[in-house]
Image (cartoon, rainbow, N blue to C red):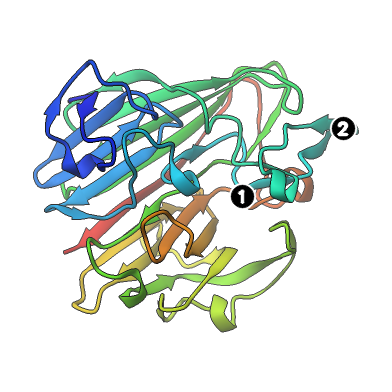
Amino acid sequence: MKYGIAMPASSSPADSARPSETRRFATGRQFELRRGAALAVITELAAGLRLYSRDGIQLTESYGDDQIPPGATGITLAPWANRVEDGVWYLEGKKQQLDITEVSRNNASHGLLRNAAYALVDESEFSVTLQATVFPQHGYPFLVRHTVRYELDENMDLRVQQTLVNDSQDRAPFVLGAHPYLRLGDVAPEDLVLTVNARTRLVADERLIPRSTAAADGQYDLSGGTAVGDLLIDVALTDLTYDGGLARHTLTAPDGRSVSLEQDETCPYVHVFVTDTFPGRSKAVAIEPMTGPANAFNSGDGLRWLDPGEASTMGWGISASL
């Protein structure tokens, strides 16, 4: 395993030339996993996925050495995913106020570890495990540990496990999630077909806070495959279809090649974000596995509680047919 990979400031990890321990990166130490023709680069910052590629084909969006992850690219999310409205929720009737980190919508966004450095717990040729602690603080008075394990399996697919452990003396609420953006090499995003196996959408207001549910119909019915084309959506979906314990959501190229986000049954929600604001790309497609949706701390939807000493794990991954 290599780290501190030396690259031009504007490059992506795919352009890595040689190891160096003298460079410092905006996302901290870089953990490089290789297996056969597969490469994954994991960052110290937010235990993020900076790159996954196979056979030289880039399967996730990436960014340069001196950048923080644009659009939260590849970061892991704990102890909540997505948003908490006004940063406010109530614990046994007592108001909790989180810091507002999405100022434009007055929300607390993407948990408490998106700017945290994760410590190395374990590493091998094909895997790395990182861990960070959320200490008791205003808005979240609990002591919890978030552990993230990345592995390239025998098929060169990427497998990820995220585990939260409650080290508090009281029950702690949580939602776990991740924020990968998928791509298929140099295929124009507009030429890809997006398939998401979900039957229900969460209807959100202008601040992206869910207010109700509805059938995933119209532009939100992605179950039969929809051309990315002019599509622009930012929506949470649920009632996923599982096959062999996994729900699969896929980008497919005109020549039949594909890349899929897979999530296990601990993740009953997926957030799909198709945007035209990702730096250097005409379109980018985030497919985000989550154990619960936005504002779960208030709605209770998908919200889980850990007893003292208890742990909970979510699993997801990325596979490809090339």
User: Could you tell me which secondary element the residue under label 2 belongs to?
Assistant: strand
User: Could you tell me which secondary element the residue under label 1 belongs to?
Assistant: loop
Nearest to viewer (mark 2 / mark 1): 2
Q: Quadrant of the N terminus?
A: top left
| Residue found farthest to the right | 93
For residue 293, above or below residue 135: below
* Disc 2 from disc 1: Cα separation: 21 Å
Horizontal relation, residue 259 to residue 298: left or right: left
- Amino acid type at mark 1: Gly
For residue 102, above or below residue 230: above
Q: Nearer the viewer, residue 244 or 195?
A: 195
Which residue is depicted at the point 53% across and 30% down?
A: 164
Q: Is there any visible trace of residue 153 in the rendered image?
A: no
For residue 58, above or below residue 147: below
Q: Where is residue 210 in the image (x, y as percent from the top left)?
A: 72, 60
Q: Nearer the viewer, residue 128 or 107?
A: 107
Which residue is depicted at the point 34% across and 26% down?
A: 25
Q: Where is residue 263 in the image (x, y as percent from the top left)?
A: 42, 53
Q: In which quarter of the image is the C terminus?
A: bottom left
Q: Residues within 10 Å of mark 2 (few under 14, many from 20)?
A: few
Q: Position of residue 66 (x, y in %)?
A: 36, 33
Q: Where is residue 179 in the image (x, y as percent from the top left)?
A: 47, 48
Residue indicated by mark 1: 292
Which residue is depicted at the point 54% across and 50% down?
A: 290
Q: Is there any visible trace of residue 69 in the rendered image?
A: yes
Residue 306 position by quadrant: top right
Residue 209 position by quadrant: bottom right
User: Can you tell which mark lies on residue 95?
Assistant: 2
